[in-house]
Amino acid sequence: METERARELLAREREQIEGEISATQRGGAEEADGRVEPGDMDSEGLYQDEFDAGRLQDLQRRLAAVERAEARLTAGTYGVSIQSGEPIPDERLEAFPTAELTVEEQERIAS
């Protein structure tokens, strides 16, 4: 994959993730509402707080993956598996710009 295309994909991924992080954090915690105690009827806000916390962790992991991919791009190793050194096909990188492994390696880990 050409370096400029990789930069573009990673910048778009970073922008999307940072936007989602901002939107998640903007919501504010519901459990701080003094009128509703956790466990009370209609305290769906507590569920939302937990959901948002998990979502934020996922987004932070995704952002860390973007940062690792950017570092690989700078080092000249972007598009190469961190496990085997095999090239990662451009089609995979287009769909998943932060890919660190080939599809086959990822499937072996998942099974």
Image (spheres, helix red, strand yellow):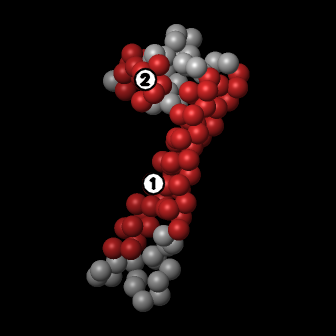
Residue 4 vertical placement versus 12 (above, below): above
Whether residue 84 is visible? no
Q: Amino acid at mark 2?
A: Arg
- Residue named by callout 2: 92
The 10 Å Cα crowd at callout 2, few under 14, some 14 to 19, many 20 or more, is some
> Which image quarter is the C terminus in?
top left
Kind of element beneath mark 2: helix
Residue at x 56% of width, y 11% of height: 85
Left or right: residue 42 compared with residue 95: left
Give residue 107's position: percent from left, percent from top: 37, 21
Residue 99 vertical placement versus 81 (above, below): below
Q: Which residue is more in the foreground, 106 or 71?
A: 71
> Which image quarter is the N terminus in?
top right
Circles 1 and 2: CB atoms closer than 8 Å:
no
Left or right: residue 23 compared with residue 111: right
Whether residue 42 is visible? yes
Residue at x 64% of width, y 18% of height: 77
- Residue 12 is marked as none
Q: Which residue is more in the foreground, 66 or 11?
A: 11
- Precedes in sequence: disc 1 or disc 2: 1
Kind of element beneath mark 1: helix
Left or right: residue 21 compared with residue 110: right
Give residue 67's position: percent from left, percent from top: 63, 37
- Residue named by callout 1: 55
**Pair 1/2: label in front:** 2
Q: Residue furthest bottom?
A: 35
Q: Amino acid at mark 1?
A: Arg
Residue at x 56% of width, y 52% of height: 18
Q: Which residue is more in the foreground, 5 or 110?
A: 5
Residue at x 42% of width, y 89% of height: 35
